[in-house]
Amino acid sequence: MNIADLRKSYEKAELSEDASHADPLRQFDQWLHEAIRAELPEPNAMTLATVGSDLRPSTRVVLIKGYDERGIVWYTNYDSRKGRELAGNPYAALQFHWVELERVVRIEGVVEKVSPEESDAYYASRPLDSRIGAWASPQSQVIDGRGVLVANAAKYAAQFLMNPPRPPHWGGFRLKPDAWEFWQGRKSRLHDRLRYRREDGRWIRERLAP
């Protein structure tokens, strides 16, 4: 098989200015709920792109845990690579790819930490194993083997029992969008792309060539 010969014709839907929302958050809310109702695998998964002090970009998949007019929220280890890169350069990009619906959403903006109270509330809602895992994993650091994680998990489980507190190095980030793009696959590669950009306190919606 020649990988260059792999092709797909996108013909499921269209995205027009008349049928889309003037507010990108409402458009995102509609598409996300359509992905959830379609029972897609992990519709809440998004790619997060950051840039380090060496100007090298890096990406990873994280899970959206909330969104409103303030921005898009996810949780992680602040000492991880993404956490360190966001501390040095708070600009980032997110991307959702709902393959089965032939849709992509791209979001760009500045990132800030959520409040400690928000992080505490979400941490408390997680399963016990996940709360212990936040203590057990020195995320992005080199370790000798999986045994390190297992030993750490056992140690912190014994230390905290059923009530581990939120680790000081773990919490939420919020991306405050200043640009959105909604992509709907179309036939003959003439895809629909609607971009929303912030100008004078309001959202400007414009079509981009595919």
Image (cartoon, helix red, strand yellow):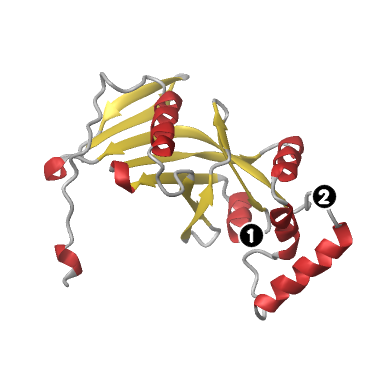
What amino acid does circle 1 point to?
Ser
Position of residue 167 relative to residue 209, above or below, is below
* Quadrant containing the N terminus in the rendered view: bottom left
Position of residue 189 relative to residue 80, above or below, is above
Q: Tell me if label 2 and label 1 are in contact, CB under 8 Å.
A: no
The image quarter containing residue 184 is: top left
* Quadrant containing the C terminus in the rendered view: top left
Q: Residue at x 50, y 46 (%)?
A: 92
Residue 9 lies left or right of residue 143; in this view the side is left
Residue 142 lies left or right of residue 179; in this view the side is right
> In the rendered image, which residue does mark 1 sit on?
80
What amino acid does circle 2 point to?
Pro
Residue 153: horizontal and vertical position, in percent?
76, 66
> In the rendered image, which residue does mark 2 sit on?
165
Residue 127 lies left or right of residue 190; in this view the side is right
Position of residue 81 relative to residue 189, above or below, is below
Q: Which is nearer the eye, 119 or 161?
A: 161
Q: Secondary structure at mark 1?
A: loop
The image quarter containing residue 186 is: top left
